[in-house]
Amino acid sequence: MKFTLSWLKEHLDTDASAEHIAETLTAIGLEVEEVSNPADALRPFTVAKVLSAEKHPEADKLQVLSVDAGEGPMQVVCGAPNARAGMRGVFGGPGVHVPGPDFTLGKAVIRGVESNGMLCSARELELGEDHDGIIELPEDAPVGTSYADYAGLDDPLFDVAITPNRQDCMGVRGIARDLAAAGLGTLKPLDIPEIETRFANPVEIRTEDPEGCPAFYGRTIRGLTNGASPDWMQRRLKAAGQRPISALVDITNYVMLDHGRPSHAYDVAKLQGAVAARRAADGEKVLALNEKEYVLDGTMTVIADDNGVHDIGGIMGGEKTSVDEKTQDVLLEVAYFDPERIARTGQKLTLTSDARSRFERGVDPAFLDEGLAILTRLILDICGGEASEVTRAGDPPTERRQIRFDWNRTEALGGMQVAPEKQAEILGSLGFEVDGDMVTVPTWRRDVYGPADLVEEVTRIVGYDQVPSTALPRQDGVARPVASRAQVAERRLRRAAAARGLNETITWSFISEEQAELLGGGEHMLANPISEEMKVMRPSLLPGLAGAARRNLDRGADSVRLFEIGRRYLAEGEKPTATLLLAGQKRPRGWQQGKAVSFDAFDAKAEALALLEAAGAPVANLQLFMDAGPHWHPGRSAKLGLGPKKILARFGELHPALAKQLDVPTGTVAAEIDMEAIPAPRNNDRARAAYAPSALQPVIRDFAFIVPADLAAADLERAIAGADKKRITEVRTFDRFEGKDGLSLAVEVTLQPEDKSFTDEEIGAISQAIIAAAEKKGAKLRG
């Protein structure tokens, strides 16, 4: 919601600065995203006088002007037909940026004549659409002064984020009401004009869908001229992000922004018969004002005449009955549409509009006659014509909710002491009626249902910063743990990842369809996505991490180490997952270490094992399985699991095709850990076993085996460790060699005696058991 300070002051009598207003809005729950001043772009432009005007020697339509902008005469080549000696205009010198055409002025040579800057038109300064000539100022305009200051364009612009529950603040007046309640001024009385009617409404109006459109009010205005809207209205609409179109369209848009009251104007000449709000028939089509055709169904409310549907009720008008420069008679529509119906229709059609954003929140059902009167007065004043009587079809739901309120609830729920008289004053300033302990809710606040909502209204106006800090009471004794096993595992994993130099990332849970297809397709599509790039619930965290990695690499990062803990959305449901991604250089080049070294699959494996161990997985029992999946490099990736059906993690290098599609360097490695697959400990005893190291020296023996090419080192280590689980405490592969005899793996085995040292016979027996266990895996002791 955008509006200017001068616009706000149409409803609020205040001397507060823009900064103070912004701070107050945010404090009372209307977050200000930005305060800007469009005049800042116009301050470099100055009031200038044309001293002389001579014909250009090489161009019939150009003139060579001598211009004084306060620093003496300057030569300017100008093509404006109204440029002449003695006039005053708006001048921009070299180095000044012109906002309309979006370019910066400089010294130029035009047809052989030097030109220093330019005199500007209204369109070039984005002050209007006039481009037939340069701006002409009064003769008393002071030469050399800033045009923005002279024209009074210093008007700060507020951009406020309105939450879905505050339908009353979708108009400038609602925001002014909140500021007045917060003590920042006085809300001005609303001037509802008395309209003199000249004839009965010739257009029949009906509502045949009382659920979707309970009330449909309208009147005809005939004999008008639909030209351009006034400059003041165009400036405010542009500030709010609206493009001025014509007087009739601009007036309806202005009232919508000013009062939160959408409306619509139909060209009476394009209507046929009665105008009715009704349900659409399945398959009916309508060409909307955005020049797109929509297929409707029976759940949607539309506006139609004898020729069929021409508007999507409460969301967007149609091309068929739209007003244009030839329009002389209009039918004004001011209706109330059911918020839920509007929301469902907009979602089905994937159609958004300013009207929809207000109707689905819920506009004031008691503001139909007042809104119609304000619209009518503006049209009569700007476009001329005469108005008919008002036709009212249906009844709006204007029943007001009543709430019995205990004034002590503000302290109990809000944590602050506010006198009942002060609470009643605050509620009254917001439009609530207070009678003893009974509070009547205004029709524009459909979000207020009970006492807790009234407490919120009081506390936000008093100020949440006034809530005193109060420590929670502590129970005697030792606190009992409240975190679940999964939460503890996640916290330990997060700390371990950060300690290992990984940077935590939080990315969107939505990705594009193209990215989802790369990873097997998305099972869950959003019915109303933020954008086409966020249409599918992610089946993997890799696209988000890849995007973050690419942004860092593009900004000069040599090494990117990222991890994220989030959820994947698969056919079988949500899967809590920890994913890490390593891209770029593992070690930079240097005179000591030589060339730069990139990450490889073993780095991803090491990180996955470390994080699994931190999360409580039985790392010693994990087995290695090949074929991590189609998204991984077929020869540089693997799986870690407690069996082929109990996979805890996948790691390795991304498939080159996937890396290319995700726009990360070839050789990027990653790992995915399934948090749900990590088994719970077999007992709940959190105490560690007593540390009791053996007093005897361990014995280390090395073995070298010729092994099959497809035998994993981890499988060989596991087999050896199982030869004597009691006395073999560690097995570690320390060498790999390929010679004429085949592939050789050398392992180091640590033996730990218990109550006495090993004899030669015992060591020999254990060695034979180790050799026998290795032979069962196809290994042969190297001679």
Image: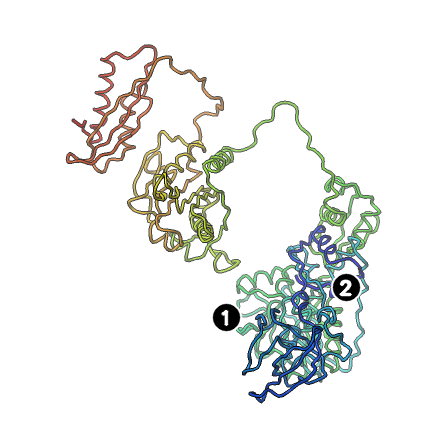
Q: Identify the image quadrant of residue 328.
A: bottom right
Mark 1 vs mark 2, CA separation in Å: 48 Å
Residue 214 shows in the view: no
Q: Which mark is residue 283?
A: 1
The answer to whether residue 228 is left or right of residue 298 is: right
- Which residue in the rendered view is the most extreme toward the top? 756
The residue to which callout 2 is attached is 9
The answer to whether residue 642 is left or right of residue 288 is: left
Of 771 and 679, which appears nearest the observer?
771
Tag in front: 1 or 2: 2
Measured as percent of width and height from the top left, residue 648 is found at 39, 38
Residue at the spot 31% in from the left edge and 21% down from the top edge:
750
- Which residue in the rendered view is the most extreme toward the front? 72
Query: Decide: marks 1, 2 in contact (CB < 8 A)?
Result: no
Whether residue 220 is situated above or below residue 9 in the rendered picture: below
Of 666 and 526, which appears nearest the observer?
666
Residues packed near mark 1 inside 10 Å, few (<14), some (14 to 19) or many (20 plus): few
Measured as percent of width and height from the top left, residue 103 is found at 57, 71
- The amino acid marked with disc number 1 is Gly
Measured as percent of width and height from the top left, residue 47 is found at 71, 74
- The amino acid marked with disc number 2 is Lys
